[in-house]
């Protein structure tokens, strides 16, 4: 009779240990996945912020040469896609930065230019913003 109680106790302890280990393993997976999703959300948020800054920069320019001059601190270069500039994680112009902004300059007539903006990091495209602005008329 006494041996039965010991066996039952040890069996309960083993079952609780297995359940405890299973809970720890599942919680570890959940926290790992949430950390990865948080990192991806931060990357996307940073790309959206940089693209909107790029759109504002484009809106202030009347020509591709003026845009190239404005982005010269970011190591701006002409490429097949348009103008490529680099930024660091603090959204500062940095020729050795990891965030790359590609800005196309596609005139549509004399008064409007379409400026698609592509943000990438380490060769991975994060965000694309298709925008344009009006060139004609007087500016305030």
Image (spheres, helix red, strand yellow):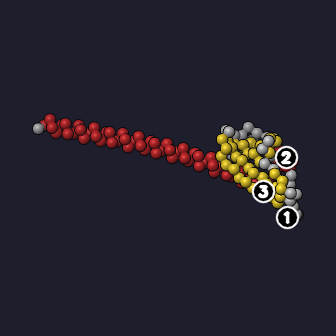
Mark 2 Cα within 10 Å, few/some/many (few <14, many 20+)? some
Task: Name the residue: 81% across, 51% down.
Answer: 106
Q: Is mark 1 in CB contact (under 8 Å) with mark 3?
A: no
> Can see residue 56?
no
Q: Quadrant of the rendered structure where residue 23 is?
A: top left
State the SS at label 2.
helix
The answer to whether mark 3 and mark 2 are in CB contact below 8 A is no
Which of the 4 image quadrants contains residue 83? top right
> Which is more N-terminal, label 1 or label 2?
2
Q: Earlier in the sequence, mark 3 or mark 2?
A: 2
Is 40 placed left or right of 101 in the picture? left
Residue ranking furthest to the top = 3
Where residue 53 sits: x, y (%)? 73, 53
Disc 1: which residue: 140
Mark pair 3, 2: CA separation: 19 Å
Q: CA distance from mark 2 to mark 1?
A: 22 Å
Nearest to the observer: residue 70 or residue 127? 127
Residue of label 3 = 132
Which mark is in front, 1 or 3?
A: 3
Q: N-terminal of the two: label 1 or label 3?
A: 3
Q: Which residue is mark 2?
A: 69
How many residues crowd mark 1 within 10 Å: few (<14), some (14–19), many (20+)? few
- Numbered label attached to residue 24: none
At x 18%, y 37%, the residue is 6
Residue 20 in sight: yes
């Amino acid at each position: 009779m006494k041996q039965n109680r010991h066996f039952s106790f040890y069996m309960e302890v083993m079952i609780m240990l297995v359940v405890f280990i299973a809970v720890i393993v599942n919680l570890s997976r959940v926290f790992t996945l949430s950390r990865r999703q948080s990192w991806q959300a931060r990357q996307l948020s940073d790309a959206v912020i940089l693209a909107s800054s790029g759109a504002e920069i484009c809106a202030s320019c009347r020509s591709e040469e003026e845009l190239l001059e404005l982005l010269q601190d970011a190591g701006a270069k002409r490429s097949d896609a348009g103008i490529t500039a680099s930024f660091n994680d603090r959204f500062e112009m940095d020729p050795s930065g990891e965030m790359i902004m590609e800005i196309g300059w596609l005139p549509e007539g004399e008064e409007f230019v379409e400026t698609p903006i592509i943000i990438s990091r380490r060769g991975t495209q994060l965000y694309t913003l298709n925008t344009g602005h009006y060139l004609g008329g007087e500016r305030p």
